[in-house]
Amino acid sequence: GAGVSQSPSNKVTEKGKDVELRCDPISGHTALYWYRQSLGQGLEFLIYFQGNSAPDKSGLPSDRFSAERTGGSVSTLTIQRTQQEDSAVYLCASSRTSGNYNEQFFGPGTRLTVL
Amino acid sequence: AQSVTQLDSQVPVFEEAPVELRCNYSSSVSVYLFWYVQYPNQGLQLLLKYLSGSTLVKGINGFEAEFNKSQTSFHLRKPSVHISDTAEYFCAVGNTGNQFCFGTGTSLTVIP
């Protein structure tokens, strides 16, 4: 079946603009995760959803970052007033449930470049 | 709180030689341990995982890892690497408290 998809695959924006990144999880997966992958810094956890609620927002780096999930499916990550340090690859993953024994299936990522 | 340490950021190895990628973790509760691989220009995919039971876990592509509770380690090994194993490898730990984190990754380069 279809895997996790993300759009756009690449996004170039100017400093100060807002961006929206989209994630379509695998159908039926109730848990959804957002990570940020910066060069040499591995994967940084941002936020996870169980259904439409986000019990853990601890990883969001600032109040310029927000995320929502509707209908227990698609999620959008919004970055307001982008800064150059926001440049990174943003990865989305989904799993059957939120239990950490479950494998997370990753999308291909969105490469964000802030000029 | 928990954390994952991958001490080796880059590991070059000749084709058909054995390799070990090191991973150490810290956690105050029981853990689940994972290794993910990211091939060039691709997303992450699961190599193997330890949930419970046998401490030696076998994964895809001939990789295996051993959970060592006393040393809080989960090192990844392969007895003979191929060119196609060149990739970024990430160790990850989750726990019953729904915390989940990844290490900074180890870049494995297989030299012909």
Image (tube, coloured by chain):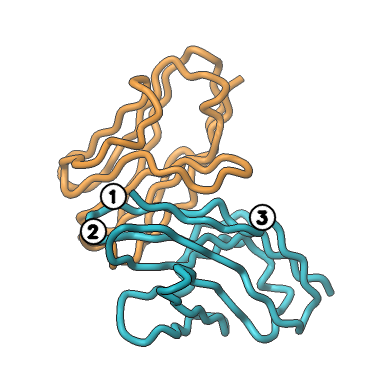
Chain colours: A orange, B cyan
Number of residues whose C-alpha sits closer than 10 Å to that of mark 2, classed few (under 14), some (14–19) or many (20 or more):
some
Q: Is residue A14 above or below residue B94?
A: above
* Residue A100 on image: x %, y %: 28, 61
Disc number lying in front (3 or 2): 3
Residue hosting label 2: A29
Residue closest to the far top: A16
Q: In which chain is the residue bearing label 3?
A: B
B66 in relation to A61, above or below: below
Name the residue at 42% across, 56% down.
Answer: A106
Q: Report crowding for label 3: few under 14, some 14 to 19, many 20 or more residues within 10 A (C-alpha).
A: some
> Does residue B81 appear left or right of residue A58 in this picture?
right
Quarter occupied by residue B9: bottom right
Most extreme residue toward the front, as rendered?
B70
Of all residues, the one furthest to the right in this rendering is: B112
* Kind of residue at disc 3: Ser
Q: Which residue is mark 1?
A: A32
Cβ–Cβ below 8 Å for labels 1 and 2? yes
Which residue is pictured at 23% across the width and 63% down the height? A96
* A89 w.r.t. A28: above or below: above
Label 3 belongs to which residue? Answer: B9
Which quadrant is home to the C terminus of chain B? bottom right
Report the residue at 30% width, 79% height from top: B52
Chain letter of the residue beneath label 2 in the structure image: A
Label 1, label 3: how many angstroms apart (C-alpha)? 28 Å
Residue A75, x across and y down, in percent = 28, 40
Front-most of residues A99 and A15: A99
In the rendered image, residue A59, in percent from the top left (x then y), is placed at 35, 37
Q: Amino acid at mark 2?
A: His
